Image: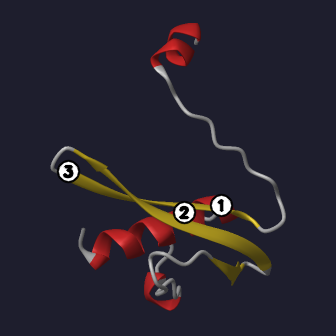
Amino acid sequence: VTPFYSFWTRKEGLLKAAGVGLIDSLKAIDVSRNIDTDFVKTFTRKEYELFSFMMQDNNARYFASLCYLKNKPIRFIELTNELLRQL
């Protein structure tokens, strides 16, 4: 996965978590950290946790980032076929 996608998903996650639309100064948002390192980013006077990860399915690889307010709990759930049938 190219560095473009890692930076893009990080910036997109941060902007969405902050409730900010796409802005003109994307270059001003520094999200250049190691992919394996979670980190805190201050943006719009709030602190956000930024978690990035890679997924692989057969020969395809995907990069994703999750951004949320610091100290606000999040919960991961595994989507199984059984769970999806219940929806």
Q: CA distance from mark 3 to mark 1?
A: 27 Å
Residue 25 in the image, given as x and y percentages of width and height: 48, 84
The foreground one among 43 and 82 is 82
| Amino acid, disc 1 | Ala
| Amino acid, disc 3 | Ala
Residue located beneath label 2 in the image: 13
Classed neighbour count for the residue bearing mark 2: other residues with Cα under 10 Å, few (<14), some (14–19), many (≥20)? many
**Quarter where residue 51 is shown:** bottom right
Classify residue 30 as left or right of residue 44.
left
Q: Up-down: is 4 above or below 66?
A: below
What residue do we see at 74% from left, 50% from top? Answer: 74
Q: At numbered mark 1, what does the secondary structure look like: helix, strand or loop?
A: helix
Classed neighbour count for the residue bearing mark 3: other residues with Cα under 10 Å, few (<14), some (14–19), many (≥20)? few
Q: At numbered mark 3, what does the secondary structure look like: helix, strand or loop?
A: strand
Q: Which mark is residue 60?
A: 3
Q: Which tag, 2 or 3, sits closer to the chain's start?
A: 2
Residue located beneath label 1 in the image: 17
What residue do we see at 78% from left, 68% from top? Answer: 70
Whether residue 47 is visible, yes or no, is yes
The quarter of the rendered structure image containing the N terminus is: bottom left
Q: CA distance from mark 2 to mark 3?
A: 22 Å
Q: Which mark is residue 61?
A: none
The quarter of the rendered structure image containing the C terminus is: top right
| Amino acid, disc 2 | Gly
